[in-house]
Image (cartoon, rainbow, N blue to C red):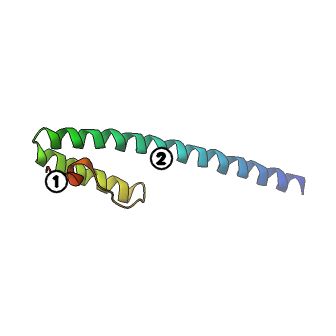
Amino acid sequence: MTAESDRIEELEKDVAHLMEEVERYRSAAEDALQQLDWCIGYFAGSQKGKVARVLSSNRSHIRRQYLRRADQATPASANGRT
């Protein structure tokens, strides 16, 4: 039974490590989305609404498909300058 409990412990460590990796990648994705938000706001403020809308659409797709999160307002869609 020791070999089995050792294997279970090893698998639990593997799962914990993978969960840490998931959180690290999720955090990096959130940071990238914040940078994208800045870009969207910049383009919206620079009268480049079409670029801001395309970036906003891409951002929404990333949030829904990869982060499994609902859409949220972006600088371009929130201030009506698109």
Residue shown at 14%/49% (left/top)?
81
Q: Residues within 10 Å of mark 2 (few under 14, many from 20)?
A: some
Along the horizontal axis of the image, is 19 left or right of 40? right
The circle on residue 25 is none
Q: Residues within 10 Å of mark 1 (few under 14, many from 20)?
A: few
User: In this view, which residue lies farthest toward the right?
Assistant: 1
CB contact under 8 Å: marks 2 and 1: no
| Residue highlighted by disc 1 | 80
The circle on residue 26 is 2
Residue shown at 23%/42% (left/top)?
41
Q: Position of residue 79 (x, y in %)?
A: 20, 51
Q: Amino acid at mark 2?
A: Arg
Q: Amino acid at mark 1?
A: Gly
**Quadrant occupied by the N terminus:** bottom right
Q: Position of residue 72 (x, y in %)?
A: 33, 57
User: In the image, which is nearer the foreground, mark 2 or mark 1?
Assistant: 1
Instruction: Give whichever of 75, 19 is nearer the camera.
Output: 75
Along the horizontal axis of the image, is 72 left or right of 54? right
Q: Position of residue 39 (x, y in %)?
A: 24, 39
Residue shown at 33%/59% (left/top)?
71
> Residues under labels 2 and 1: Cα distance?
29 Å
Disc with the residue nearer the chain's start (2 vs 1): 2
Residue shown at 60%/47% (left/top)?
18
Q: Position of residue 77 (x, y in %)?
A: 21, 54
As helix, strand or loop, the secondary structure at mark 2 comes to: helix
Q: How many marks?
A: 2
Along the horizontal axis of the image, is 13 left or right of 39? right
As helix, strand or loop, the secondary structure at mark 1 comes to: loop
